[in-house]
Amino acid sequence: MQHFIDVIIPIPLPKLFTYSITASEAGFLSVGMRVSVPFGKSKIYTGIVSKIHNEAPTVYEAKEIHQILDDAPIVNEKQLQLWQWIASYYMCTLGDVMRAALPSAFILESETVITKNKQTIDESILKDDEFLVYEALHHQSSLKIHDVSNILDKKNVLPVIKRLIEKEAITVEEEVYEKYKPKLVRYVKLHANFSSETALQKLLDDLSRAPKQRDVVLTLFSISAKTKKPIKVSDLSEESNASVSIIKTLIDKGVFEEYHIQTDRVQYSGDDNEDSKNLNSYQKSALSDIKASFETHAVTLLHGVTSSGKTEVYVKLIEDAINNGKQVLYLLPEIALTTQLVTRLQNYFGKQVAIFHSKYSAHERVEVWNNVLKNSAKAQIVLGARSSIFLPFSNLELIVVDEEHEQSFKQFDPAPRYHARDTAIVLGNMHSAKVLLGSATPSLESYFNAKQNKYGLVELMQRYNDVMMPEIELVDIQEKLKKKRMKGHFSDRLIEEISETLKAGQQVILFQNRRGFSPIVECKTCGHSPQCPNCDVSLTYHQYRNQLRCHYCGYVMAMLQDCMACGSQDIDNKGFGTEQIEEEVKQLFPDYKVARMDLDTTRGKYGYEKIITALEQQQIDILVGTQMLTKGLDFRNVRLVGIMNADNMLNFPDFRAHERSFQLMLQVSGRAGRTDERGKVLIQTYNPHHNILQQVSTNSYIEMFNEQMDDRYNYKYPPVYKQIKITLKHKDYNRVDVASIWLAKSLRQIFADNVLGPESPPIARIRNQFHKNILVKIPKQQSLLKTKEAIIKINNSFFSIKDFRSVKVILNVDNF
Ligand code: ADP
Ligand code: ZN
Ligand code: ZN
């Protein structure tokens, strides 16, 4: 009898390849183990065994495998099931999923580049062939697999490389992410012993023979009189013209007290774990509601306002799960942006928390993978971004999806274009685990599912410690303009509030929405921006043709000469960015430290963390920033949040624009006044009566939900309809144009009016490739599976046309 295996290879092939194996190999191999296999003329790939059987392929002769790479499976059956689901649901290949799922150190292939590990190892543990490779890396900084073949004079070198990786002698080359340690800034204050008038007088008398020290004490006073902020040692030294050693003498004498601003973000020291907090009565009832809901609904949504203490509730559920010896997955939108939370969980659970992030080094990722695979105590709780749904869980009891509304859970590029929240629900189902989705501003999808009783719903509507929700004030900039009360982009109200906040020694955050690539047109007099008659989205301005276009249905009109609403000719299509706000605010408040947080300023290594640390340590008075500011940050001293212009968010050309604006504004508002003092939020807008703004200012999620759902029904958008976006790309415009028209026409023959496009996106050419989009809308009662089968069939006929073969077609299911 002949033996064969079907192998998943990390390249986008529609079918799996079959290789032949010997009887003894068949006895040894199991599904989920790695093998190295030849492919094409000379390539070698690492593949995963997906099936062991006895049926020879009919259309080609099965090649033999090169080598078995594992003694035991590194991928379990449940994972393979999940891969299968992802490939079929998101319309991609298993090879695509494999490449996204496995740490790259697991996928050795002919193109892999290896380098020597920085730490030297004990060479005596290396076998002869391993040593030869290791030795070669002393002379050359890196080697390719085929170089290794030459050195060892044999073809099958992957096992040697795999062993070298396991012995930590080498690593595969890739971007490495190191941990950031914030620098602690030293501050001083007068020791409490000298707080009384008499004690102070006596101190100054005593210091009369040490005039320099006396000077320093007096300088400290004059600075504190001017500012209520903490005083840095370096500033005091500069102002008083005294050396740091004089300040140190005063500290040693007990005149001054030295301190650091304590933040929650200190690196986990590995010492004793903290006990979790006692929940207040609201949190307690939320917790018991969640447990009750889990009895009937494996997926439950926790709708809890910002700062209500959702995290502490998650912590209790996690404790239960790990006390049962089970695994927990805690999903976060972006790890790099949530260092505060990482530290919080490490303080509670210490070494049981493993962090998994695509930017961690290959070695760290393999380590977490193996710990999860072994169900080791070291990875009982995995805290990770979206790719952590791919880890080899075997014993999962709880999945928490924090900030479930966040867009970044969806992968855009490359395939698999999966949504980690939705995939986590499928994963949970496979393990019979409970899934808790948490947010202060749930996605319409999740809230809709909760209303339909598909998910359970639990609410937590009180902020912890009864801190009040910030007071939200809408500022009508149209009126301010008329009354000449604007300085640049700042209304008199905003300037007043900023001044007051700064005087009180507190901090300000100014939020400016990052504009998409598509500029919208806005009347400077009345704020109106032209809408598409069919889609309820703003039209985008296309400078090239001087046209206004709808991103969704292709509606086109000539650029306006005057405003359709008020007739004014003062029409603006430029928009203003964070940079301009930063400039203006620096001029308005020259005595204060202003910083900016956006893609430009956070690009460098640790750019983001540096700014967060500076804000925490109060080295920044005013922070101007984009979306990034909304990610669950907890700043004690921020009292005022200013939203520079709500309209450019609301008018963004996307059917989710209103939902997103609501979420963004409430999330940024949540950054204000997290302590006993009530925070304040100022929203500048041309349309203070816009329903979304009214709903934000009264924190009326339900009203927003109901109103937005009406639109989604009327215009057939998710979550009422599902949708698949098809993008075609080619460097030749005519070819992609003809191809997209052909494809849309074929799709219309089956799906009729539920096909929109083809439409050129606002940036019609990216990297010299012209794009065309087609949208397929899928009613709830239409079978998703059959729809996808039909699309695949049409796609196949498409590629049988010679002219279209070079056109790239990208399928994005549940596109965002
Ligand atoms: P959310 O995640 O809902 O925005 P957090 O969990 O971050 O809220 O809680 C807000 C703040 O309140 C945090 O600083 C947290 O430490 C504190 N907090 C929440 N619950 C408790 C509790 N039961 N005991 C003490 N402090 C708490
Ligand atoms: Zn339209
Ligand atoms: Zn107008």
Image (tube, rainbow, N blue to C red):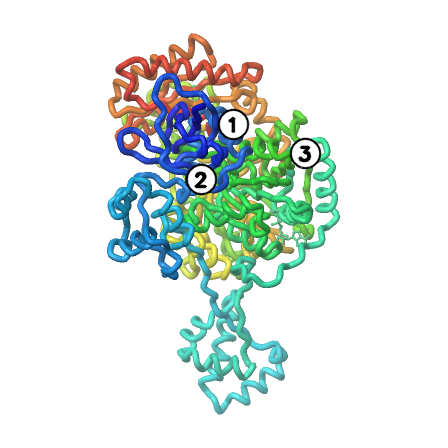
- Badge 1 element: helix
**Residue 224 screen position, x and y as percent:** 52, 70
Residue under label 3? 457
**Amino acid type, mark 2:** Leu
**Residue 559 screen position, x and y as percent:** 33, 24
* Residue 192 found in image quarter: bottom right
Nearer to the camera, 156 or 596: 156
Q: Residues within 10 Å of mark 1 (few under 14, many from 20)?
A: some
Q: Are marks 2 and 1 in contact (CB under 8 Å)?
A: no
Furthest residue in direction top, as rendered: 749
Q: Earlier in the sequence, mark 2 or mark 3?
A: 2
Q: CA distance from mark 3 to mark 1?
A: 26 Å
The disc placed on residue 399 is none
**Amino acid type, mark 1:** Trp
Furthest residue in direction bottom, as rendered: 209
Compared to residue 591, the image places residue 429 above or below, namely above
- Badge 2 element: loop
Residue under label 1? 85
